[in-house]
Amino acid sequence: MNSLYLWINALTLLFPLLLSFDQKVAFYKRWKYLFPAIAITATFFLLWDEWFTQMQIWGFNAKYITGYYVGHLPIEEVLFFFTVPYASIFIYEVIKAYVKHSELFEDLHRWFTIFFFGIAITLLYWYSDKLYTAMTCIILSFIMGTHLVVIRRRYMSWFYFAFAVSIIPMLIVNGLLTAKPVVYYDVAQQIDLRVGTIPVEDFIYNLTMLSMCIGLYQWFNRLGLRSQLRHQKQSS
């Protein structure tokens, strides 16, 4: 039982990894853009995670982890920030490959971004004294604001669709993590509003992490495309 969190990570990654070689999606061809995006995102969130763990805003049940640590974080928690973004961006690419009529979604991204920005600002106003709630809302409002004002890319429509789909596996994974619990929280630092056993902040946290990762992933994709175009011009 002390490897439960490790098994959750492994199963989260298993099917997306095996299906990465599907000919239509060919996700493995995107790894060179994906892995840097995941690494940067994971670094940011691991630093945040380490800080909150030291402050005892959350912690980890020794019954369900192997006992290997990076700083104050179980190795399983470190892996979480690689397996979940991989699986989620895989869902994004599958939706792009298999769901047709993208024009149905392309014009919705701005409204969804405004909606999530508004949610973050509202929760921050009412619960600024709760550190987990406040931090997730500050970072989400910054990312959503950046997408509204600076980036304004239509890929966010596909991302929101993928995020909605990813809530299903999230309910399973985070449900297991919070039901046992593998991860426990200081309820004084959150709203203590839950979906089952999952704090509502976890949904905001997940959206924040994945929206950062998708932004970096698309940026690396654009850099790669520009590089290819330069090489084509030079060779022609």
Image: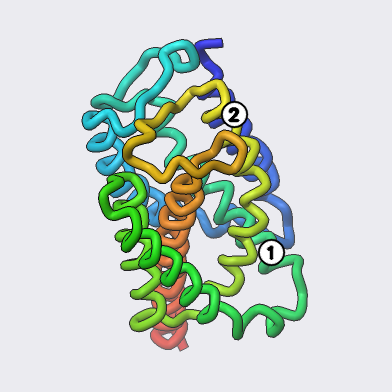
Where, by quadrant of the figure, is residue 235 drawn?
bottom left
Give percent across and percent down for residue 179.
57, 26
Give percent across and percent down for residue 207.
48, 56
Give percent across and percent down for residue 143.
36, 67
Density class for disc 1 (Cα within 10 Å; few <14, some 14-19, many ≥20) is some
| Badge number at residue 95 | 1
As shown in the figure, which amino acid type bears the numbered disc 2? Leu
Work out how far the residue at label 2 is from the one at label 1, CA to CA, in angstroms: 26 Å
Q: Is residue 217 left or right of residue 89?
A: left
Q: Is residue 21 above or below residue 226?
A: above
Q: Residue at x 32, y 27 (%)?
A: 73
Look at the numbered disc 2 and give the secondary structure of its residue: helix
Where, by quadrant of the figure, is residue 208 drawn?
bottom left
Density class for disc 2 (Cα within 10 Å; few <14, some 14-19, many ≥20) is some
Q: Is residue 230 left or right of residue 9?
A: left
Q: Residue at x 63, y 41 (%)?
A: 171
| Badge number at residue 176 | 2
Q: Earlier in the sequence, mark 2 or mark 1?
A: 1
